[in-house]
Image (tube, rainbow, N blue to C red):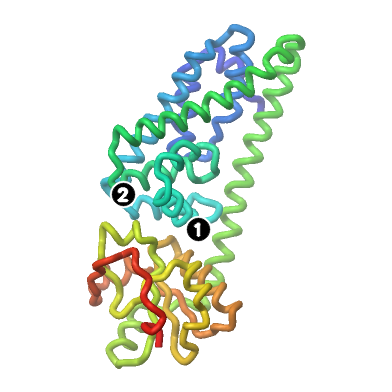
């Protein structure tokens, strides 16, 4: 599968725009090989470096702006869909939200260089009410850095390729094989990782109806809300009596977790991924009665079960609340 260098020459900037646009929409077709090829061709004078840079940035901004407004309109629901494409569904959204919550502009500027973050950062920005012009400014800088660096890398090797034209064909064939291998590894890794998580969940997760029965019967249950504060802001409710912890804080304070009752963890992740990972971490710390809630917060709400209002989604309850 040779990289279609002749096709790039034929369709030029249109192909470059379309390929970058497709990748930034989250389709696993890496744009790096074609950007490298465009950079090499610019060294030969067959493409314009500034024009290729402008086209690449425009395609990136078009895709990112679309995700920005989708995130603003549909919130965490679209993030759950995007998270399913990640090789690390357990942490992909949380890491993006943590990074975005601390430094919004910097996150957007470096997002293109971090696998998974490039597609997630724009909808997270939209979900959390970032001003669109400010988003365009920082995202534009990030897109220019990414496209420019990749084009420059291709141009750096352009002189070498120009000296021996056969190297260009060899590079094309190698890049095409690498592209195909990357796609295969992506899907294989996703399938293997997902099967492992689902197998662990099947033996441990708790049905919402069973939790509702326990609560109605007055049974002592320790319920933990693992959602990120940014997920709670647009829907400030939680399960009755739930305590809010980050997975990291819960593990650090594991000595305060009661051992004489069920520990129920819930989130809004695909297949309860964050809850599953946290449950496994607590098991290693000697806490055995820990179970993710099937369907998490969304399933509990869908069934019409009671909810408590959250006035401060960023809080962590004091230690005495756990006893």
The residue that appears at 49% across and 19% down in the rendered structure is: 53
Query: Left of 319 or right of it: where is 3?
Result: right
The residue that appears at 60% across and 21% down in the rendered structure is: 152
Q: Earlier in the sequence, mark 1 or mark 2?
A: 1
Comparing 286 with 64, the one in front is: 286
Query: Left of 186 or right of it: where is 208?
Result: left
Label 2: few (<14), some (14–19) or many (≥20) C-alpha neighbours in 10 Å: some
Residue 280 picture location, percent across and down? 56, 73
Q: Quadrant of the N terminus?
A: top right
Tell me the element at label 2: loop
The residue that appears at 26% across and 61% down in the rendered structure is: 235
| Rendered image: mark on residue 59 | none
Q: Quadrant of residue 294?
A: bottom left
Q: In this picture, is 320 found above or below 129? A: below
Q: Quadrant of residue 240?
A: bottom left
Tell me the CA gap for discs 1 and 2: 19 Å
Label 1: few (<14), some (14–19) or many (≥20) C-alpha neighbours in 10 Å: some
Q: In this picture, is 198 found above or below 173? A: below
Comparing 305 with 152, the one in front is: 152
Tell me the element at label 1: loop
Comparing 60 with 319, the one in front is: 319
Question: Contact, CB < 8 Å: mark 1 with mark 2?
Answer: no
Residue 99 picture location, percent across and down? 45, 50
Residue 124 picture location, percent across and down? 37, 47
Query: Left of 168 or right of it: where is 259?
Result: left
| Rendered image: mark on residue 91 | 1
Observer-side mark, 1 or 2, equals 2
Number of marks: 2
The residue indicated by pointer 2 is 128
The residue that appears at 31% across and 87% down in the rendered structure is: 215
């Amino acid at each position: 599968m040779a990289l279609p260098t002749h096709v790039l020459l034929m369709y030029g900037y249109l192909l470059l725009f379309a390929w970058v646009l497709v990748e930034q929409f989250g389709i696993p077709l890496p744009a790096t090989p074609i950007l490298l090829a465009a950079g090499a061709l610019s060294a030969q004078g067959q493409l314009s470096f500034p024009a290729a840079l402008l086209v690449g940035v425009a395609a990136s901004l078009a895709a990112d702006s679309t995700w920005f407004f989708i995130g603003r309109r549909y919130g965490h629901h679209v993030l759950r869909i995007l998270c399913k494409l990640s090789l690390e569904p357990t942490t992909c959204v949380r890491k993006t939200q943590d990074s975005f919550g601390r430094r919004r502009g910097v996150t957007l500027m470096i997002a293109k260089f971090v696998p998974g973050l490039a597609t997630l950062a724009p909808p997270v920005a939209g979900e959390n009410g970032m001003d669109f012009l400010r988003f365009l400014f920082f995202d534009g800088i990030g897109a220019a850095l990414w496209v420019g660096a990749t084009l420059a890398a291709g141009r750096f090797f352009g002189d070498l390729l120009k000296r021996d034209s056969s190297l260009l064909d060899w590079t094309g064939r190698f890049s095409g094989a690498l592209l195909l291998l990357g796609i295969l590894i992506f899907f294989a890794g996703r399938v293997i990782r997902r099967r492992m998580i689902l197998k662990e969940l099947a033996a441990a997760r708790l049905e919402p109806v069973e939790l509702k029965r326990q609560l109605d019967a007055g049974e002592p249950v320790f319920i933990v809300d693992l959602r990120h504060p940014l997920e709670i802001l647009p829907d400030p409710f939680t399960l009755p009596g739930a305590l809010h912890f980050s997975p990291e804080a819960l593990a650090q304070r594991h000595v305060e977790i009661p051992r004489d009752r069920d520990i129920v963890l819930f989130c809004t992740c695909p297949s309860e991924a964050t809850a599953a990972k946290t449950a496994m971490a607590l098991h290693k710390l000697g806490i055995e009665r820990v179970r993710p809630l099937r369907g998490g917060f969304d399933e509990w709400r869908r069934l019409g079960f009671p909810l408590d209002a959250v006035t401060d989604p960023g809080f962590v309850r004091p230690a005495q609340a756990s006893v």
